[in-house]
Amino acid sequence: MIFTLSSPQKNSKQFIARQGQISFFSYTSVENIEANNNQVLSIFDTETNEIAVNMLMRAFVFKKDLMYEHFNESYIESDLYPKATFEGKILDFEKNNNQLQTKIIRGKLTIHGISKQIDIKTNIEKSKDSYSMTGEFIVAVSDFQIKIPPILASNIAKTISVKFRFQFQPYEE
Amino acid sequence: MKLKINKLTVFLLLLFLFVGFVVKFTIFKNSEKSIANQTAIATLNSDELVNSFTLDEKKSNALYEGKIIEVTGKIKEISFINQRITVILTSNNKTFGVICDMNPNQKEKIKKLSINQKITVKGICKGFLKDVILLDCFIDFSANE
């Protein structure tokens, strides 16, 4: 996350998305849980192909207050781990390709203070001087040491589906 | 006998309905919907808010996170990305600002806003990334200049 908060280097070409969207879904026979965060920050460097993502866990909006409380107080422990981050690199990114390109982002996803290597498939589209990135991936709740009490185990899926959408603009200080 | 059963059935049905309503409106109500009428715990301008977070994020989170605050600042940008209405306020630090995710019922008020206009926004503070993030925001027009 270091390069996220530092000023852009003169030679690097950085792009920023301040209002990235991340949604996650948990489907079980008991209930479906969905949450959206529309203020996800991402910075993407087209010279190094590095990408960093940073989000506030408390900025996820749920349909029910109780879901929000359980998520922040019991599972994610947002007081201790208020942010989730991702730092990675887009493999074989073609910055001048104006067509839709599907690439792998390889990097480290940190949720609940636990980091895990992950490959995420993304669709990248360039338009004029901006890029959009969308995709979907799966995370296992157990990978991030998130403890679900047995009484609620049937309400929460073992694997959570995550969707993302970022619109990057040139990053000017 | 038949009448008794019917009475019991009706009673049980009513009881279920009553319990259902109580559960629906107490446990599952969405409290964030009603912040328009709630009082802010702090009133400050966007410079003060951003400076507070850049100086000491931990302390600022303890002060403002999860609380309703009222922030006055100049509009840098109004956007409609992902079907959200977002107003970004500037601060004296060029890199940082305040992202205000507006309550959908503010749509008509948003139409009257223009870039650089000074406004006061009330919302729930969620913390700081590169900007301070406020959700479920309402605009207060009385502070206009």
Image (cartoon, coloured by chain):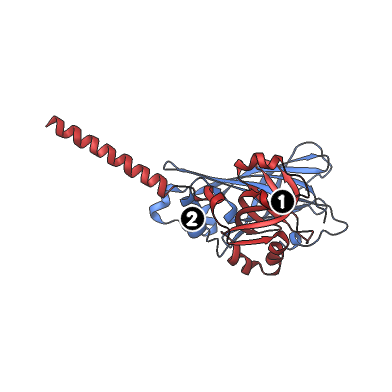
Chain colours: A blue, B red
Q: Chain of mark 1?
A: B
Determine if marks 1 and 2 fall on one subunit. Answer: no
User: What is the secondary structure assignment of the residue under circle 2?
Assistant: helix
Residue underneath mark 1: B144
Quarter of the rendering containing residue B128? bottom right
Q: Residue furthest right?
A: A11
Q: Residues within 10 Å of mark 1 (few under 14, many from 20)?
A: few
Q: Nearer the viewer, mark 1 or mark 2?
A: 1
Please say if A100 is above or below A2.
above
Residue underneath mark 2: A69
Q: Is residue B124 left or right of residue A5?
A: left
The percent coordinates of residue B96 (x first, y second) are 74, 59
Q: Chain of mark 2?
A: A
**Amino acid of disc 1:** Asn
Q: Pick the residue in front: A62 or A53.
A: A62
Identify the residue shown where x is 58% and y is 51%: A60
Regarding residue B83, the answer to whether it shows in the image is: no
Q: Residue furthest left?
A: B1
The percent coordinates of residue B120 (x first, y second) are 67, 53
In contact (CB < 8 Å): disc 1 and disc 2: no
Q: Quadrant of the N terminus of chain A?
A: bottom right
Q: Pick the residue in front: A156 or B33.
A: B33
Q: Gap in Å between the C-alphas at discs 1 and 2?
A: 36 Å
**Amino acid of disc 2:** Glu
Q: Pick the residue in front: A91 or B51.
A: B51
The percent coordinates of residue A50 (x first, y second) are 76, 54
Identify the residue shown where x is 84% and y is 42%: A96
Q: Quadrant of the C terminus of chain A?
A: bottom right
Q: Is residue A13 left or right of residue A66?
A: right
Quarter of the rendering containing residue B38? bottom right
